[in-house]
Image (cartoon, helix red, strand yellow):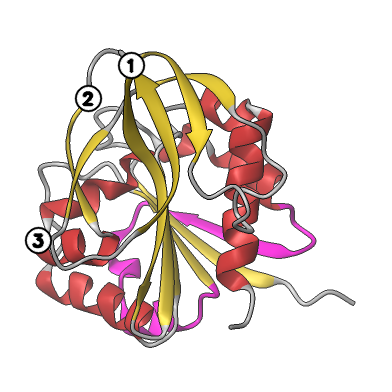
Amino acid sequence: MTIQKHVLVLGDNARAPYHPLINIQEELSAILGEEQYEISYTDNYNSLDADILHACDLFISYTDCWSLPIETEQAAALMQYVHQGGSLLVIHNGISLQSREECVELIGARFTGHPDYQTLDFRFTHAEHPITDGVEPFSLEEEPYMFEFHPAGSVNLLMEYVLEGQRYPAAWTDNRGKGRLVYLMPGHHKPSFLHPASRQLIRNSADWLTKPL
């Protein structure tokens, strides 16, 4: 019998300016699968609590809180969770946690803006990594997020997208204490979660993050 791993997904609905969590829940559940993962969705930021996070095998951020910083205690709980061995997957707008400065260092980068939504070509910089293994280069209509990496970070870049002949980061991993994190740029809306390559990257990320070190 397979023991399910507990996944907690935090996002926004009523106050989401661009990326409501409810719009992608069905597809995210289908990607992860109910046999291996027990998934809880919430838009309650009180879930950023040490005891609640400690019970999670994986925490996924799909927050849309660009102008509403989380509380200091909430940021501290999330950082403690990861540093003590927790697993963090940040998808697309989930990087909005950057409204609290500590989370910029935690995730490894800051979102700085994006050109217009358009078709992007994604290429892998680390094709042999378990997250990208078996995934072919792909094209997807997306918001071309741009980032500034935190100077204290040492991210392992996995994927880039091409825009006007230039390459930009689109996925990375990093270690934080005893824990690990993954950032995936694709994820603007439901169609992003329907693309086979994007689905495989999410599933591979969850499997890699929850695999014992």
Quadrant, the C terminus: bottom right
Instruction: Give the labeled residue for mark 1.
Output: 165
**CA distance separating discs 3 and 1:** 32 Å
Q: In the image, which is nearer the foreground, mark 2 or mark 3?
A: 2
Q: Find numbered disc 2 in the image and state the secondary structure of the residue it sits on.
A: loop
Task: Tell me if 9 is positioned left or right of 27 in this view.
Answer: left
Q: Residue at x 55, y 75 (%)?
A: 57
Three-letter amino acid code of the residue under disc 2: His
- Is 79 one of the magenta-colored residues? no
The numbered mark, 2 or 3, whose residue comes first in the sequence reads 3
In the image, the segment drawn in magenta is 33-57
Q: Position of residue 9 (x, y in %)?
A: 46, 56
Image quadrant in which you'd find residue 175: bottom left
Mark carried by residue 101: 3
Quadrant, the N terminus: bottom right
Q: Find numbered disc 1 in the image and state the secondary structure of the residue it sits on.
A: loop
Three-letter amino acid code of the residue under disc 3: Glu
Instruction: Give the labeled residue for mark 2.
Output: 114
Three-letter amino acid code of the residue under disc 1: Gly
Q: Residue at x 38, y 34 (%)?
A: 20
Neighbours of disc 1 within 10 Å: few (<14), some (14-19), many (20+): few
Q: Position of residue 198 (x, y in %)?
A: 58, 35
